Structure formats: structure tokens, C-alpha cells
Image (tube, rainbow, N blue to C red):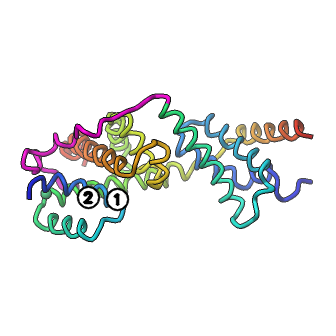
Amino acid sequence: MSPPDDPHTWLNEHGDYLYRYAMSRLHNDELAQDMLQETLLAGWKGYARFAGQSSIRTWLVGILKHKIIDYIRHEIRGRNLTEAVESDPTSAFFNANGGWSESPDAWKENPEDLYSNEQFQKVLESCIDKLPEKQKIVFRMRDIVGEDTPTVCKCCDITSTHLHVLLHRARLSLRKCLNTHWFEKGTHS
Amino acid sequence: MKQACHYASRLASDSLDRPLSLWERLRLKLHLSMCSNCRNCDNNLKLMRQINTLIRKNHYGQLRLSEQQRQQLHKALDQHDNAIH
Ligand SMILES: [Zn+2]
């Protein structure tokens, strides 16, 4: 008989939830499994400090979240990704007067139809893939994973202003790419 | 207003991440009321955000540990248990 609180019970009750949390952030099966294992063990070791002020699940997610932030920080530092703030690539979308050099189209399709269209998903993936590395990382974390801005800043060692600059760049490039490779073509409807 | 559309696109993007100040909100609203290009851009950005949210909910919401992963994890926890006792 295992007591109600032990890592095996946690694995049975919260394993899928924690795994989803890790997978959505790491996109890597093995890594997500490792993080989950470490989290359960760390939780078990530190169980004395869990005072029951939150649910076990919230507490375990907190541990997992820290481990993932540490991991991503390490990854990003190791790759030494820099992107100059001074030269602004979004300028390319505007003329000297700050007006659009090419008018954005109105997109008529609705999000559900687009989401369930496999071809569109492919175009979206390839457009995201073309972003500069650092923009890609913050865009995925913020807009796909839905991480809050303090967490993204912490992972990437940047200020919130810098984050907003990077997201602005990423979103305008993505908008342009989707417009060119999907909406403007209009071959799919 | 120089750089008006460029700046408006920045505010439209920022509004997805932080509450705009009163001044910024007014400025964006006024600009959007006069500029169909920026209205389109603003709507495009919002549509992109909606699609990304659907990806998150539908794709990652379905994931489960495989039976094999589950067994491996149980085993790893057992080994650790034996190591301390
Ligand atoms: Zn404008």
C-alpha cells in the first residue's frame, strides 16, 4: 500500500498534465520525460516543505516550471544568440514617412477554418521557421506556448522592452510571410 | 504625424502583451479610425494570435504519456526509492 502522497501517486494523477506542460515548452519527448522524472523526485525530496497551501499539482508545476526555465536559459546562453536592437528590420515594411510600403490586406478567413487546414498549418510552420533564431524563440514561447512576459524575459535574459521589440519584429515578418504565401494567393478557397 | 503607421503597428503588437497606457490607447484608437492599412494589420495580428491559441489548446491538449513512458517513470522512481533506503 502506498500512502496517498508519494511520487507514484503523483505520476498517476498528474503525470499527463505535467507531461503536456513540459512538451508544449520543450517539444522533445525524452527531455520532457526527464524533466517530469526530476520534478517528481525533487517534489518527493522537498515534500516536507510543501505546507499544503496550494494543491499538489500547482506545487509540482512550480517545480517543473523552474527546471524548464533553467534549461532554456542555459540553452540560449550556450548558443550565444544576439540580435541588435539598433538596426530595426521592421523599417523595411514602411516608407520614409512611416506609412506602409505595401498595404496589408484584410484577411477574410476565420481562425477555426485556418487552424484545421493542414496546408495552412504547413505554411505557418515554414513562416515561423524563417524567423531569426531569437525572435523565433520568444515568439513561440509567448504566442504559441502562451507563457507570460516575465517568464519569457527570465528565460532569455532580456528586459520587457526588448521582448516587445522582438515580438513586434517577429509578428510583422510573420504577417507579411503569411500574406505572401497564403492570403494573397487565394488558391485554397 | 511622422512614422505614424510604424508606431501604430508597434502599439498593436504591444497591446497583445501589456496593457497600453491611456495615451497610447487613445493614439492607437485614433490612428486606427483613420487608417485602413493599420486596421487590417491590427486584425491580422489578432487573427494570428487566435490561431496560435487554437494550436496550443488542440495540439498540446491531446498529449498523454505513453504506457511505456509511464512504466519507465515508475521504475525510475522505484530505483530512486531503493537508493535512499
Ligand atoms: Zn496606419
Mark linked to residue A19: none
Q: Quadrant of the C terminus of chain B?
A: top right
Assign ligand 1 to one image quadrant.
Answer: bottom left
Q: Is residue B36 above or below residue A90?
A: below
Image coordinates of residue B52 in percent, x first then y, are 40, 51
Quadrant housing residue B53: bottom left
Depth check: A136 or A109 in front?
A136
Image coordinates of residue A38 in percent, x first then y, are 71, 41
Magenta segment main secondary structure: loop
For label 1, the crowd category at 10 Å Cα-Cα, with few meaning under 14, some 14 to 19 and many 20 or more, is some
- Name the amino acid type tagged 2: Ala
Q: Chain of mark 1?
A: B
Query: What secondary structure is marked by label 1?
Result: loop
Q: Is residue A79 magenta?
A: yes
Would you say the residues marked 1 and 2 are in contact, meaning their CB atoms lie under 8 Å apart?
A: yes
Image coordinates of residue B30 in percent, x first then y, are 15, 68
Tell me which segment is drawn in magenta. A78-107
Query: What secondary structure is marked by label 2?
Result: helix
Q: Is residue A39 magenta?
A: no
Mark linked to residue B16: 1
Quadrant housing residue A129: top left
Residue at x 73%, y 42% (from the top left corner) = B70
Quadrant housing residue A102: top left
Image coordinates of residue A6 in percent, x first then y, are 82, 52
Give the Cα distance between marks 1 and 2.
Answer: 7 Å
Mark linked to residue B12: 2
Horizontal arrangement in the rendering, residue A53 relative to residue B17 (left or right): right
